[in-house]
Image (cartoon, helix red, strand yellow):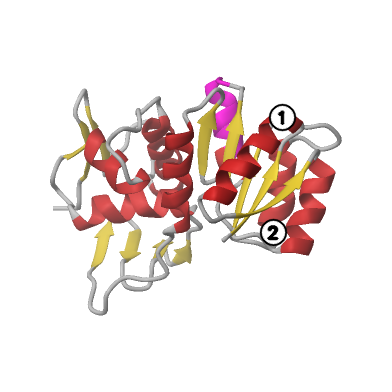
């Protein structure tokens, strides 16, 4: 699997190149945002991992530039810890966000989860409806008022899991294990951010969600119409 690493820290890139090669990845590197866009076009990576604070073109602009023509999963690895930075990256089209410094085991788990992007569900999978939203689990497609809704791969996995367990409480730990493939990944606000993005796309009033509910201190629940 080919992965593009875009980061202006040569020592980090060197270390990641060695580590990821050991785990079977073919690594392509870029030292700034402009190089990242060019490399994404010329090398057609299966995964993209990038920093936000790069010279020439920052990470958010890189995501916006490549999202128009590739659906390769994008993992942001950045020292920026503010919620606004994470939301900007997710809004631009990133699929996941890891804060520096990171544990290599967690990074590898995130990459494996992104690499497992589902291309479809078993024949006969159900269609789930709530409000003006239709979730077709077989076609891996979401529509709202008849119009297609674009979800990132991680947003889809969260919605799919909730849809398959509609009406039931799904704990944070269960979601973390299903989405990122390990129960050792800390929440760190990621689920809250992804649920916020899903509510913006699917709820009539994202600030007072009727369907994508938070069960305080426990997890989340997809509530269908009565």
**For the stretch drawn in magenta, what is the main secondary structure?**
helix
Give the magenta-colored segment's residue range.
81-89
Which residue is at a point 78% across and 55% down the rendered structure image? 39
In this rendering, position of residue 189 left or right of residue 29:
left
> For the residue labelled by badge 1, is the local secondary structure a helix, a strand or a loop?
helix
Q: Looking at the picture, does residue 146 appear above or below residue 110?
A: below
Q: Which mark is residue 180?
A: none
Whole-percent x, y for residue 87 in the image: 55, 33
Whole-percent x, y for residue 73 in the image: 55, 53
Whole-percent x, y for residue 79 in the image: 61, 23
Residue corresponding to mark 1: 11
Whole-percent x, y for residue 175 in the image: 27, 42
Task: Note whether residue 74 is visible.
Answer: no
* Nearer to us in this view, 168 or 107: 107
Task: Note whether residue 122 is visible.
Answer: yes
Q: Earlier in the sequence, mark 1 or mark 2?
A: 1
Q: What is the CA distance from the residue labelled 1 to the residue labelled 2?
A: 31 Å
The N terminus - image quarter: bottom right
Residue corresponding to mark 2: 68
Q: Looking at the picture, does residue 56 appear above or below residue 2?
A: above
Which residue is at a point 40% across and 62% down the rendered structure image? 142
* Nearer to us in this view, 221 or 81: 81
> For the residue labelled by badge 2, is the local secondary structure a helix, a strand or a loop?
loop
Question: In terms of image quadrants, where is residue 133?
Answer: bottom left
């Amino acid at each position: 699997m080919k992965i593009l690493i875009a980061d202006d820290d040569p020592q980090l890139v060197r270390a990641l190149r060695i580590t990821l090669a050991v785990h079977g990845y073919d690594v392509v590197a870029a030292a700034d945002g402009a190089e990242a866009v060019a490399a994404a076009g010329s090398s057609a990576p299966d995964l993209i991992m990038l920093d936000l604070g790069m010279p020439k073109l920052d990470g958010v602009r890189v995501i916006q530039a490549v999202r128009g023509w590739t659906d390769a999963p994008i993992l942001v690895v950045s020292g920026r810890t503010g919620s606004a930075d994470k939301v900007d990256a997710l809004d631009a089209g990133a699929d996941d966000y890891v804060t520096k410094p990171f544990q290599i085991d967690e990074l590898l788990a995130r990459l494996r989860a992104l690499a497992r992007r589902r291309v479809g569900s078993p024949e006969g999978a159900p269609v789930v409806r709530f409000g003006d939203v239709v979730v077709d689990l077989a076609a891996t497609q979401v529509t709202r008022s008849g119009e297609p809704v674009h979800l990132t791969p991680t947003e889809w996995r969260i919605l799919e899991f909730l849809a398959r367990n509609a009406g039931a409480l799904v704990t944070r730990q269960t979601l973390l294990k299903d989405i990122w493939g390990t129960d050792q990944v800390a929440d760190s606000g990621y689920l809250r951010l992804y649920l916020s993005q899903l509510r913006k796309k699917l709820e009539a009033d994202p600030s007072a969600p009727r369907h994508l509910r938070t069960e305080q201190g426990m997890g989340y629940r997809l509530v269908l119409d009565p």
